[in-house]
Image: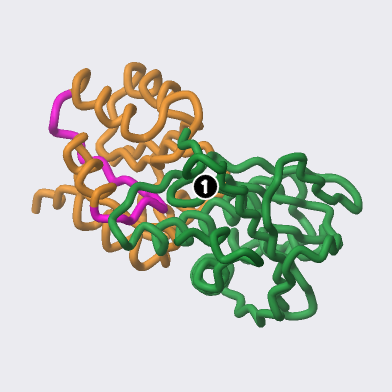
Amino acid sequence: MSSLDRGHGIEPSLVGSLTSAAHEVFETMVFRSLTAGAPLHDTGLRPPADVVGTVGFTGDVSGLVTLYATLEAAREIAGAMFALDPLGLDDDIADAIGELANMVTGVFRTKLAGNGRPWAISVPTVVVGTDLYTKYLTAGRRVLRSFGMGDHEIFIELVVAETPPDGGPERS
Amino acid sequence: MRFLIVDDSSTMRRIIVNTLVKIGHEDYVEAPNGRDGLDRLAAAPVDVIITDWNMPEMNGLEFVRAVREQHGPDVPILMVTTNAARDDIVEALRAGVTNYVVKPFTSSTLREKIDAIVPAKPA
């Protein structure tokens, strides 16, 4: 049964897999522990963000994983990944957030692929700006979860595409 | 010993370079995709290749297959990837990968994998 067959929300196991992936990646590559907030379903909430990394996935369900960070949080993440002073980092911040989104989605994908079915993920895209938000033009369900990281708060969003009436999502 | 690091992420290339330098390997070249990696290989041989899987232009599997076709089976190839499902690993090994590291990884894990595929120095 896909997440959408249940009529409302995204299947808790998907949210749990993504949350677990985020913890694993941050602890291993960023050397930071995360404190997860409650998942917020389809609220339309706009998380504060200056750096946004997105990776698509497709398999039994298709969708997007998006990581939102303020510039300060992104700078700290990049500094931790490179073992460098965060204040000296500028150009590398976007790539670090893209790689982080890629790894979180990759681990998420691996957890979902445990049943042996093929899943694929896209290469990451990153947008850097001021007070960014994402408006999705295609139908889908979304869940947004905040994560405390020291003095910072980041957000990870899972968007699952609506399943076409005649079958599962198309695979790319 | 000369390394070729192929990854579209400058972040991941930097993490790999930092690890290589830590363990005493300071001779390396970098490429942002498989196509550029093949150009680097054509320009000068390397002793070890470390490559990502999920890349634009030419992905890691295509790159590995091309390396094996053009340069033979000898150079060790370590694939660094988020693709950790059993079928993915089998596919990578069939393409010619020598060993793999699943992201996320610790620097000690990467070091162990590199040590395992790098031929021992003659006494």
Query: What is the drawing colour of chain A?
Result: green
Q: From the top left corner, tell me how far across and down residue B109 is, in percent.
A: 34, 65
On-image quarter of the N terminus of chain B: top left
The residue that appears at 48% across and 61% down in the rendered structure is A108
Query: Which kind of residue does numbered mark 1 sit on?
Result: Phe
Q: Is residue B83 magenta?
A: yes
Q: In this view, does B17 lie to the left or right of A101?
A: left
In this view of the protein, which residue sits in the foreground, B27 or B107? B107
In this view of the protein, can residue A47 be seen by the observer? no
In this view of the protein, which residue sits in the foreground, B48 or A128? A128
Q: What stretch is highlighted in magenta?
A: B72-86
- Choose top left, top right, bottom left or bottom right for residue A34: bottom right
Q: Does the magenta stretch include residue A39?
A: no
- Choose top left, top right, bottom left or bottom right for residue B85: bottom left
Q: Which chain carries label 1?
A: A
Query: Quick check: B31 above or below A1?
Result: above
Q: Mark 1 points at which residue?
A: A57
Query: Quick check: A135 above or below A79?
Result: above
Q: From the top left corner, tell me how far across and down residue A159 is, in percent.
A: 65, 54
Q: From the top left corner, tell me how far across and down residue A19 is, in percent.
A: 57, 72
The residue that appears at 42% across and 58% down in the rendered structure is B103
In this view of the protein, can residue A98 be seen by the observer? yes
Q: The orange chain is which one?
A: B
Q: Residues within 10 Å of mark 1 (few under 14, many from 20)?
A: many
